[in-house]
Amino acid sequence: MTPPESSPGHLPSGATAGGSAKGLLAGRRGLVVGVANKRSLAWGIARRAHEEGADLAFTFQGDALERRVRPLAESVGSTIIEPLDVTDDDQIDAVVETLKDRWGRLDFLVHSVAFANREDLLGRTVDTSRAGFATALDISCYSLIALARAAEPLMTEGGSIIAMTYYGATKATPNYNVMGIAKAALEASIRYLAVDLGPKNIRVHGISAGPVRTLAASGVSGMRGMLKVMPERAPLGRNITVDDVGATAAYLLSDLSAGTTGGIHFVDAGFNITAMRHPDRNAPGG
C-alpha cells in the first residue's frame, strides 16, 4: 500500500496539487463519476471545482469513454483516473481503495450517472420490461447509495455528495418514462442518505438541471422541442448551460452551503415554477 499523498486533513490554501491556490474548494479532494465528454454536466462541475481549487479523481466505463475522459481529466491535473462500472461493487471498492491509498480521505463525491434502455424511453411507461426497470433503477439510483456507502469511511472530516436529477422526477415528462421513475427514486434516496450521513457532517444534495445538449440527453426523444420551450416559459428567458450547473455545484460542495442538506436545487432558469407560458412582461400593459 502506498502512503497517502498527504496526511488526512484539509490542505492549507496554496497547497493543492491540481487546483488553483485559492478558491471555494481549495485543499478539497473530490471524486467525479459520470463524465462522458466536454459537454457533460459532470464535466461542467469538475471544471468549476478545479477552478475553485479542488483536486479531482475521475472514473470511466470502457475504452471508448476512457479516450474521452482521460484527456479532460489530465487537463485539470488529475492523476487518478480509474475504470468503474457502478453495477459492480468490487469495482466501486477498488476505486475507493485507490483514493484511500493516494489521498487518505475524500471531501466530496459527484454522482452524474443514469441509464435506461432506449426501448424503455419510447412508447408507454406501462410497457417497460421488468429487466429494463431493474437496469434503470440500479444504474440511475442504487449506484448513488453504493457509492455513498463506500465513500463514507473516507469522509473523515465531513463532506458533500451531489447527484444529478431532472424535473421529470416530479412531473410526468414526455419520453422520459422509466427514467422519471428512477430519478424520483434518486431524489428520495438523497433525502434518506442526508438523514443517515448528517451526524457525520456529510451533506447530500440533488441538482435538477434543465435540458442541456449532452450525450445522455441525446437518448431522450424531443430534446429539441424542450430546448425551444425553455426560453419561452422560463422566467429568465433562456436555456441553462453546463457552467450554470457547475456554479451551483461549487456552492453545494463548499462551506457556503454548510447549513443545507437533503435538498433538490433547480438550475433551470426558473422553469419549474411556471404552469404555462407567461405574456411578455415588457410589453405594454404586461
Image: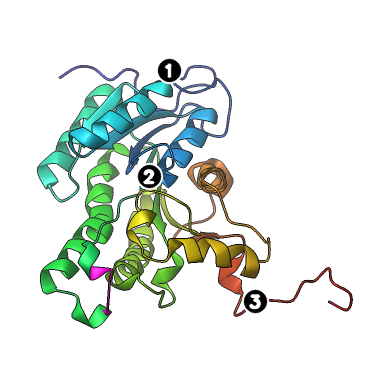
Q: Which residue is denoted by mark 3 in the rendering?
A: 277
Tell me if residue 121 is in the magenta stretch: yes
Residue, x 48% and y 43% (percent of image)? 253
Position of the C terminus by quadrant: bottom right
Q: Amino acid at mark 3?
A: Arg
Mark 1 vs mark 2, CA separation in Å: 20 Å
Viewer-closest of 34 and 190: 34
Residue 73 quadrant: top left
* Magenta: main secondary structure: loop
**Mark 2 or 3, which is nearer the eye?**
3
Q: Residues within 10 Å of mark 3 (few under 14, many from 20)?
A: some
Estimate the spatial distance between the alpha carbons at disc 1 and disc 3, rounded to whole Å: 48 Å
Q: Amino acid at mark 1?
A: Ala
First in sequence: mark 1 vs mark 3: 1
Q: Earlier in the sequence, mark 2 or mark 3?
A: 2
Task: From the top left corner, tell me how far across and down residue 5 is, in percent.
Answer: 32, 17
Q: Which secondary structure, mark 1?
A: loop
- Whether 165 is among the magenta residues is no
The residue where tag 1 is placed is 17
| Position in image of residue 197 (x %, y %) | 34, 54
- The location of residue 44, given as percent across then percent down, is 47, 40
Marks 1 and 3 in Cβ contact (< 8 Å): no
Q: Nearer the viewer, residue 232 or 266?
A: 232
Q: Is residue 37 above or below residue 129?
A: above
Please identify, in this view, whether the residue under mark 1 or under mark 3 is nearer the observer.
3
Horizontal placement of 121 versus 12: left or right?
left
Front residue of 194/281: it is: 281
Residue 10: image quadrant is: top left
Q: Is any part of residue 105 visible from this angle?
A: no
Label 1 or label 2, whichever comes before in sequence order? 1
